[in-house]
Image (spheres, rainbow, N blue to C red):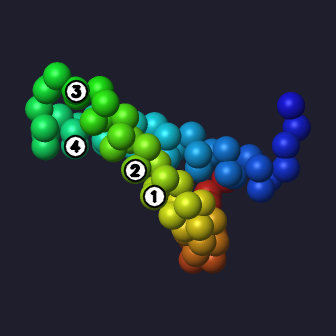
Amino acid sequence: MKVSKKVHGLLFVACMVLLMVFCMSFFMTWVNAGFVADFVFLWMKNFGMGFAVAFPIAALTVPLIHKLLDRFLQVEE
């Protein structure tokens, strides 16, 4: 399937945020609440909130970071 560079970038950011927030919310819920009876509910609640915050931030900052790195660094080929 062919997609534009912009769509590819957004999908990449979404996948990275999904994986990171999934893992981080698990560990933070475990640390803060322990394995309580409603652990999965608390984890999914934290996951949803984390994704809602992290995705827009990442979608805005990742392209800026790429531009900054491209400006100041040269990649070896």
Three-letter amino acid code at the position of disc 1: Val
From the top left corner, tell me how far across and down residue 76 is, in percent. Answer: 61, 57
From the top left corner, tell me how far across and down residue 62 is, in percent. Answer: 57, 62
**Cβ atoms under marks 4 and 2 closer than 8 Å:** no
Residue matched to label 2: 50
**Cβ atoms under marks 2 and 1 closer than 8 Å:** yes
**Mark 3 or 4: the one toward you:** 3
Mark sitting earlier along the chain (3/1): 3
Residue matched to label 1: 53
**What kind of element bears circle 4?**
helix
Q: Is residue 10 left or right of residue 20?
A: right
**CA gap, disc 1 to disc 4?**
16 Å
**CA gap, disc 2 to disc 1?**
5 Å
- Report crowding for label 1: few under 14, some 14 to 19, many 20 or more residues within 10 A (C-alpha): few
Which residue, as the protein is rendered here, is positioned at the far top? 37
**What kind of element bears circle 3?**
loop
In which quadrant will I find the N terminus? top right
| Depth order, front residue of 8/34 | 34
Residue matched to label 4: 28
- Report crowding for label 4: few under 14, some 14 to 19, many 20 or more residues within 10 A (C-alpha): some
Three-letter amino acid code at the position of disc 4: Met
Three-letter amino acid code at the position of disc 2: Gly
**CA gap, disc 4 to disc 2?**
11 Å
Residue matched to label 3: 38
From the top left corner, tell me how far across and down residue 31 is, in percent. Answer: 13, 40
**Cβ atoms under marks 3 and 4 closer than 8 Å:** no
Three-letter amino acid code at the position of disc 3: Asp
- Report crowding for label 3: few under 14, some 14 to 19, many 20 or more residues within 10 A (C-alpha): few
